[in-house]
Structures are given as C-alpha cells and as structure tokens.
Amino acid sequence: MNSEEEFYDAETGLESDDSCEVSFKDALVFDNTQVTGGSSTQENGVWERRKTLPADMISRNNFSVWSILKKCIGMELSKIAMPVVFNEPLSFLQRISEYMEHTQLIHKACSLSDSIDRMQVVAAFAVSAVASQWERTGKPFNPLLGETYELTREDEGYRLISEQVSHHPPVSAFHAQSLKQEFEFHGTIYPKLKFWGKSVEAEPRGTMTLELLKHKEAYTWTNPLCCVHNIILGKLWIEQYGTVEIVNHSTGDKCVLNFKPCGMFGKELHRVEGYIQDKNKKKRRVIYGKWTECMYSVDPKFYDTNRKSDKKNGADSKKLKQEQSCEGEEADEMPDVQETVTVIPGSALLWRVTPRPAHSVKMYNFTSFAMTLNELEPGMERLLAPTDCRLRPDIRAMENGDIDTANTEKERLEEKQRASRRERSKDKEEWATRWFQQGTNPHTGAEDWLYTGGYFDRNYTDCPNIY
C-alpha cells in the first residue's frame, strides 16, 4: 500500500468443564498497589507497572471522518492524512506486541506431551491474539521507517523486538523469544485497508509462526479479517471474520477455525468455531467459543450429540443466512451481545480473556496490558534503541492529552521522513533495515522478514535518527 498515513480433563492436561463456572489461570496480573495520575510506583524494590494512562481519551465529538473518507469508497486507503484525534496513543508496532498478552498459553503448550493437546492450546493462543481489538476503534500511529519497539517481560519469560522494515508498502516485522529457549514467535504484517462507505475493512496480510523448540514443532497461520462498522453514522463496533488455518508442519496436524461474520440478527457475533484434524484427516477435537470471551475444546462425538439435541429441541430449526455486514444503506447497529458461551458437557476450557479495568472506556478501551506498553520505566531510556517508539514525541504528547503538540510533532516527523526519502532517492541509496532481513520462511516457503539477531547486545551506533 502506497501511503503516508495508514491505518487459547485429566487426559488432555486441561481443565474439564460441564458448566460456565470454570476457573483458568490467565496471564500474570500486576500487583494491586494503588497508582496515581498514570505514574508507576516502586514497592519493596519491585517495579509496579502503571494501571492507567497519564490523561483520559481525547474526545472525537467535534471531528468528522466523513469529510476525509467520502472520496475513498471502495478504494485502498492510500495517501489519506487522518487527524491525530482518530488515533490511539500507541504505534502499530506496540499494537502487534499485544499478541503476547496471553503468553501463558504458549507456556502451556510447551508443557504438554500430546501434539493434539498442544494444537488446541496453540489455537486458543491464535484467537487470544485478536481479543484486545474488541472496541479498540482508534487507529494506531503508523510506524516510521526504521522505527522499533522492544518489549521485555522477565516475569512472563519472554522478550520481543519489532521493526518497521518498509514504508511503501508498510511492513512490520516482529520476533519474540522465550528467555528459557522454550519457544520463538515471529511474523510479518502488511495490512491492507479499504473503506466501504460506512465501514473500514482491514486485511492483516502476513504469516504468524510459532516454534515450540523442545518439541521441534512449527505452527503457522494468518489472522482473520477485521471490520470497523459505522465509520460515518452510529456507534463504532468491530467484528472479525474469515477462516484461519493453523498447520503443525512437524506432525501434519491442522486446525481450521471459522471466525463467523455477525449474520442476520447478530446470532453469530464474535463466535469462533472449528476443528482439529490429524495427519490422516481424522477429526480429533472441536474448538468453539468467542474471540471476545473464551474458547473451549470438546470431543467431536459430544459436539455432534449436542447439536442433534439442539435440533430436536428446535434451537436450529432454521439456519440464518449469514451476511458480511459491510453492505447496506443504514447504520450497522451492533446486535445485542450474549456475554456467555453455552458450554457443551465434557468441554475443556482453553482460554478466558483477562477482564479490562473499569476505567478502560475512558482510556481508548485499552486492556491492562496495553496501558503499560508506552511506559518508560526508570533507567529504560538509556537501554532502548533511539528508534524505539516510546521515544516518539507525537505519541507521547497524545498520551498526555496534548492534541496540538501531537499534531505538530506528527507533521514534523512525517516531513522529516519524506525529506530523508528524497535524499536517498537523490543519492540512489536503498534503505537498510537494522534488525530484520528479507528471506524465506523455512516452514511455508513464502517470502518473510527474519530476525538477524543482535538487538539485545545493545549496540545501537548504526541506528538512524528518525525522531
């Protein structure tokens, strides 16, 4: 895209569940020490990550996106300069790092001895990776060429580095690794967005690769489509839809997940359903739930029995025609959401989303995890690469509620980027990436951006001056 501005029973090792009342240990939760004004504290020598942003969300009530997008219906969103007020105070590189919010699922998969059991937990991880997008209607800042983001979480056992490796088209690459050499998780994302008159559809092109090193397994998949409704009129809401196929390249096991479009009357809103098959194409498990809430696994015969029972009781007497709701003439009113999943007897809970803080709605609908991503901990600045997006002045200003400075700095950085591109063109120089290089994904054979290593050696002398 050419653009200056874009937009997880005893036999399985999992908990058996015959009801909705199931406990599952989610990601590590930060300490409950009170925090004031968005600042973090230190107690007994232990760093306390912040639990809020420095300022509330900037109001968008006095701004019209229609005046900007009305000429772009059916087009890829290229060279569309969006006011910073429609952003959220995170870079797209930071948004990518939210895939790691439920890293405990990867640790769980590493601990399981059976490949089918591992696959169902990996499937839950793939679903959990998009859960934070619910109600996140702000657009992340486009990364500048050469921008990076580092995320190290020793308590959760991993570290991640990402880099904006291309601007035309925009391509972001990331690589996460276990601190105990248990796994590697990496991918390349080059989003394609289109405006359809009242909605924006995002196709997150690129492949996710998860390697479980102890088991010598590699899994790959792509993320579902995402649609933001009511860009012009009505309340903004998000749905994910499309088929996600997860392949275990070592065993031949496969998981096919269907992220269902809302459909008529909203019956399928947020629902995910699929199955795991082994290399002989025998269906081994059925996976079901909601990407906004939880995912379960059940034996196919229990699933089939339950469906037959539902039909007998008339629950599915008439199949509703599903329609991808990026069409129509009136506002796409979001259907009422049923906040629980009907659990089939004999199911095992794979994953449940971490609840958002009560003040999330005032802070761009961020999760507790997202609240911490732009935080500069004491002593961190001297360790970060100078290209790290925590150091971007426009994002920092927006996070602090200073919209005027955010706009000014955003324009300055974009012009600096254009000037640098003109200089390279004049000197016939090619942009050189710092931490990733183009290559071939060894598992899919497709073109990919691969981490070359060395970032955590902390030698940043060759990093460009992009801010």
Image (tube, rainbow, N blue to C red):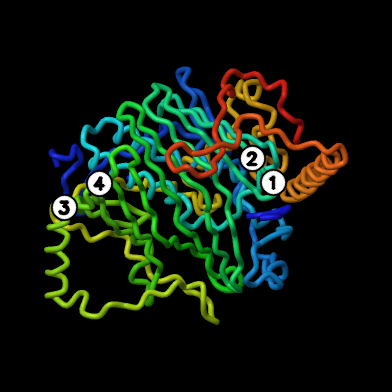
Q: Secondary structure at mark 2?
A: strand
How many numbered markers are drawn? Answer: 4
Crowd around label 4: few <14 · some 14–19 · many ≥20 (10 Å): few
- Relative to 429, is 293 above or below? below
Disc number for residue 164: 2
- Label 4–label 2 contact, CB within 8 A: no
Q: Nearer the viewer, residue 167 or 62?
A: 167
Q: Secondary structure at mark 4?
A: loop
What kind of residue is marked 1? His
How far is disc 1 from disc 4 in space, using C-alphas? 40 Å
Which tag, 1 or 4, sits closer to the chain's start? Answer: 1
What kind of residue is marked 2? Gln
**At which x and y percent is residue 153?**
47, 28
Please give the name of the residue rendered at 49% of the width and 28% of the height, measured from the top-left corner: 159
What kind of residue is marked 3? Asp
The residue at which mark 4 appears reads as 279
Q: Nearer the viewer, residue 28 or 173?
A: 173
- Label 2–label 3 contact, CB within 8 A: no
- Label 3–label 4 contact, CB within 8 A: no
Q: Of circles 3 and 4, which is in front?
A: 4
Which tag, 2 or 3, sits closer to the chain's start? Answer: 2
Please give the name of the residue rendered at 48% of the width and 53% of the height, measured from the top-left corner: 133
The residue at which mark 3 appears reads as 299
- Relative to 315, is 149 above or below? above
How far is disc 2 from disc 3 in space, using C-alphas? 42 Å
Please give the name of the residue rendered at 73% of the width and 52% of the height, measured from the top-left corner: 4
Q: Nearer the viewer, residue 335 or 399?
A: 335
Dividing the image into 4 quarters, which one contains the C terminus? top right
- Label 2–label 1 contact, CB within 8 A: yes
